[in-house]
Amino acid sequence: MDRMRGLLLRQDGVAETAGFVGNRLDRPGEVLELGEVPRPSPGPGQVLIKVRRAAVNPSDIAFVQGFYGQPRTKGRPAGFEGVGKVVEAGPGLMGRYLKGRDVAFYVTPDGSGTWGEYAVTRASVALPLKKGVADRDAAGLIVNPVTAAAMLDLVRDDEAFVFSAAASQLGKFIAGLARDQGKRMIAIVRREEPAAALKALGAAHVLNETDAGFETELARLFAAEKPVIFLDAVAGGSSPVIFRSMGENARWVIYGKLDPSPTEILEPGEMIFMNKSVEGFWTTKWAGETSFLRKLRVFGAVQDRFRDGRWATDVSVEVPLEHAIERLPQALAQPDGKVQIIVSD
Ligand SMILES: NC(=O)c1ccc[n+]([C@@H]2O[C@H](COP(=O)([O-])OP(=O)(O)OC[C@H]3O[C@@H](n4cnc5c(N)ncnc54)[C@H](OP(=O)(O)O)[C@@H]3O)[C@@H](O)[C@H]2O)c1
């Protein structure tokens, strides 16, 4: 049987305690090992993909530590998304159509991860690449770009919204898309450096949560802009203050947990008397509830944004698969840009 190399999960299931979901992985060797396993084969409705490049997202970091709502399988490669070529298809029309094509893809729970030389996933989450989409964009084409498109649907046209951790890759995508849709992004960052770039990308306002006058500036801006939606991946730090500063009907939409501190609601009375609310957002759920046609339109639109340069993935470090265990901690500690794993040429 053919064998392949991969970054293999060292544990089964989920972690016993709920954990912190950040974007750092300081001891990858505790949860992953470089090893060899039999090459997986595609079942009905699945395809086998020769992986070229894979994303390293906060959801991957959560998953390998057992903090993502999906159990791990010991000995299987990790990695949720990547780009490669379909080399084999299990029974099914879609797989047959994809065979031989370059695809951006996401790995479903019945598949095998992108941090390996070959990956298996359902044909329905392998998107044939349009000409002109670079591998560095294709490797992260689904998780963040699709989330950007789906989450912005929560904001009404001509409305302002608040967006935390705005220096993230998702924040950079949102900035441009929001501007093009006439939605005003109030971007919250924790460092000064990304502010100018975010404005150039399309953010209407950028506030630094570490500035002394942050709360005063927040109050002034919210009085003028009246944002209703707060898209929040931090769920800690200044999030409670931001939510308290918002007016009637404000919706705190939590879609990540980058801050390890407990998430507080400072004024529960506002939920009662001001109709404010807290909810979650998960693209996986969105995908399950959204029509095939709408998804096709979104997938096409995100590829077009990369093709014509309206979007570009900000890749800061490329790590070869065989050196990932030792290099990931330092690569992920860099403040700006995404880390990608180079799996093959
Ligand atoms: N729910 C969903 O369906 C869904 C889908 C996609 C993404 N997400 C979430 O979206 C978030 C962004 O993902 P990404 O891939 O775009 O991330 P990324 O490019 O890796 O960037 C992470 C960002 O988070 C910031 N950050 C980290 N810890 C922070 C803290 N304690 N307080 C404030 N900011 C903090 C970093 O700020 P610095 O630049 O200052 O270091 C960095 O800009 C993640 O939480 C991810 O899990 C959720």
Image (spheres, rainbow, N blue to C red):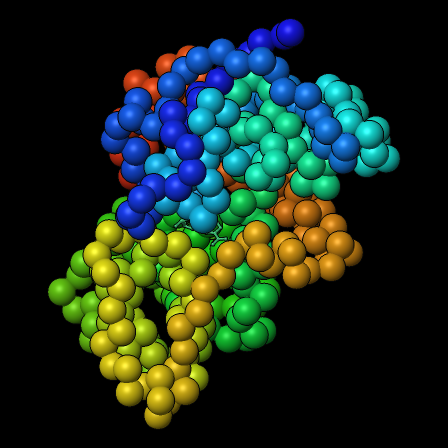
In the rendered view, does 59 fall on the left or right side of 43?
left
The residue lying toward the viewer, choosing from 222 and 47, is 47
The residue lying toward the viewer, choosing from 49 and 17, is 17
In the rendered view, does 170 fall on the left or right side of 1?
left
Which residue is found at the position 29% from the left and 47% from the top?
A: 17
Q: Position of residue 220 (x, y in %)?
A: 28, 79
The residue lying toward the viewer, choosing from 330 and 13, is 13
The residue lying toward the viewer, choosing from 248 and 313, is 248
User: Which residue is situated farthest in the left direction here?
Assistant: 212
Instruction: Give the quarter of the figure containing the N terminus.
Output: top right
In the rendered view, does 230 fall on the left or right side of 84?
left
In the rendered view, does 48 fall on the left or right side of 75?
right
Q: Position of residue 2 (x, y in %)?
A: 63, 7
| Vertical position of residue 9 compared to residue 284: above or below | above
In the figure, residue 327 lies in which quadrant?
top left
Which residue is found at the position 41% from the left and 78% from the top?
A: 277
| Vertical position of residue 126 compared to residue 201: above or below | above
Whether residue 97 is visible to the viewer of this picture, yes or no, is: yes
Which residue is found at the position 38% from the left and 29% from the top?
A: 11
Which residue is found at the position 13% from the left and 65% from the top?
A: 212
Whether residue 227 is visible to the viewer of this picture, yes or no, is: no
Instruction: Give the quarter of the figure containing the C terminus.
Output: top right
Q: Position of residue 117 (x, y in %)?
A: 56, 17
In the figure, residue 162 lies in which quadrant?
bottom left
Q: Position of residue 230 (x, y in %)?
A: 40, 69
| Vertical position of residue 287 compared to residue 274: above or below | above
> How many numbered discs sit on the rendered protein?
0
User: Which residue is situated farthest in the bottom direction here?
Assistant: 273
